[in-house]
Amino acid sequence: MLINHQIGYPAIKPTHGFRGHNNYGRGGGNARSFNSSRGKQLGEKLQKAKYDLSQMDQIEKDFYNEHPNVSNQNEREVEQYRNSLEITVQGRDVQRPIRDFYEGNFPDYINKALVDQNFEKPTPIQAQVWPIALKGRDLVGIAQTGSGKTLAYVLPGVVHIFNQAPLSRGDGPIVLVLAPTRELAQQIQTVCTDFGRCTNVRNCCIFGGAPKGPQLRDVERGAQICIATPGRLIDFLEYGKISLRRCTFLVLDEADRMLDMGFEPQIRKIIEQIRPDRQTVMFSATWPKAVQRLAEDFLDDYVQVNIGALQLSANHNIMQIVDVVEENEKEDKLHKLLQEIMNEQENKTIIFAETKRRVDEITHYMRKKGFKALCIHGDKAQQERNWVLGGTLSILRNEKSW
């Protein structure tokens, strides 16, 4: 069991939406970041793309053939199955969920990839989303992190790619996945790469806080799937380094988090570069009004799939302990807690603080007390943060290195 131990203030302080500086997107900051060399807001140069759909090839979007096992169920059985998985749906003529991978009627190359990855059964979000997405419909999936949503859109995206015309040089991606952070983008890329080995589908991943050169080379080599944070993608679009004219399958992952971080103007700028008859799927952990507005503006006749409750709730597998102490007592309390926690050598602890300065102070304090401690925050270089997250502690032997 995980333990979340919080040391709080005696008085309850009001909280506000996160608007701090961070190293997401292009060169750090949120969507309100400005290009310091030009004094202009990121994406200001981009004009809405104009598409004459009558002069363009029609997009193939419907690849779903309902399995007889699914067709033969009556409505009561379907509803009972949805209830057992805490699935609720809203929309017109919603496709029925599947119970096993073979009921998805995936092509052989997908089935082989699933076998190679040792997947056994679809998760609730996958069971309901796959039939809808393979049918070519827009959808919103509301499910908490760890629900299997990445595979819920990656597999339909791969099938979508195989049913479009091959890419020519300079075309840009067919599938675009927008994610709020570098870390999530890289996690998505890992899933895409795992399935790309079996399907010969290439991907590229572009995000801020890293050199542009290698990312540009990946784009130029040609990739059917592009995973991107909004800021860096806007940067590449502004300078004509990537085209979205061939993009026909758009994914907005963790949409609520992207909007919380202030990325809405950038998301809207990016969507304006994509043809309007695309297929769009959106995933979110919550369903606030800002996400609802985005869905209404950019999704057409969409289906809403909800797994569990609409609001986030505490994970019951985590013990929550809150100690309320005076400010001047915090360090002593932390020291005592760490002594208890560190009795066993394998225990690891994550400590969050309100400011970057406080993070540095706590790290210095802990190391004076003999604990092996490292810290990360927005003033640290990305390479340094990666190194810390990698769990390397040997450098602590040399105090001058930090």
Image: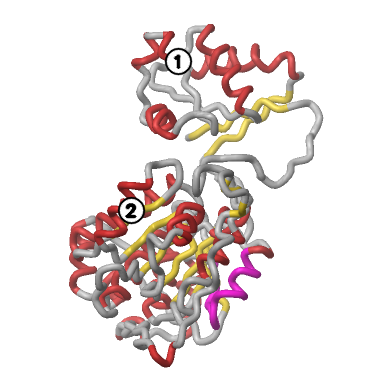
In the rendered structure, which amino acid carries the disc numbered 1?
Trp
| Residue count near mark 1 (Cα–Cα under 10 Å), binned few <14, some 14–19, many ≥20 | few
Q: Are marks 1 and 2 in contact (CB under 8 Å)?
A: no
Tag shown at residue 216: 2
Quarter holding the C terminus is top left
- Above or below — where is 193 with respect to 159? above
Tag shown at residue 225: none
Is residue 48 in the magenta section?
Answer: no
Viewer-proximal residue among 213 and 205: 213
- Residue drawn at the location 32% of the way across and 62% of the way down: 121
Point out residue 314 in the picture as x, y percentages from the top left corner.
Answer: 60, 46
Which of pointers 1 and 2 lies earlier in the amino acid sequence? 2
Point out residue 9 in the picture as x, y percentages from the top left corner.
Answer: 75, 26
Q: Which residue is mark 1?
A: 402
- Residue drawn at the location 63% of the way across and 57% of the way down: 311
Point out residue 19 in the picture as x, y percentages from the top left corner.
Answer: 66, 45
In the rendered structure, which amino acid carries the disc numbered 2?
Leu
Viewer-proximal residue among 301 and 202: 202
Q: Is residue 7 left or right of residue 400?
A: right
| Residue count near mark 2 (Cα–Cα under 10 Å), binned few <14, some 14–19, many ≥20 | some
Q: Is residue 158 left or right of residue 177?
A: left
Q: How is the image coloured?
A: secondary structure
**Residue 154 position by quadrant:** bottom left
Circle 2 SS class: helix
Q: Which residues are magenta?
A: 291-306
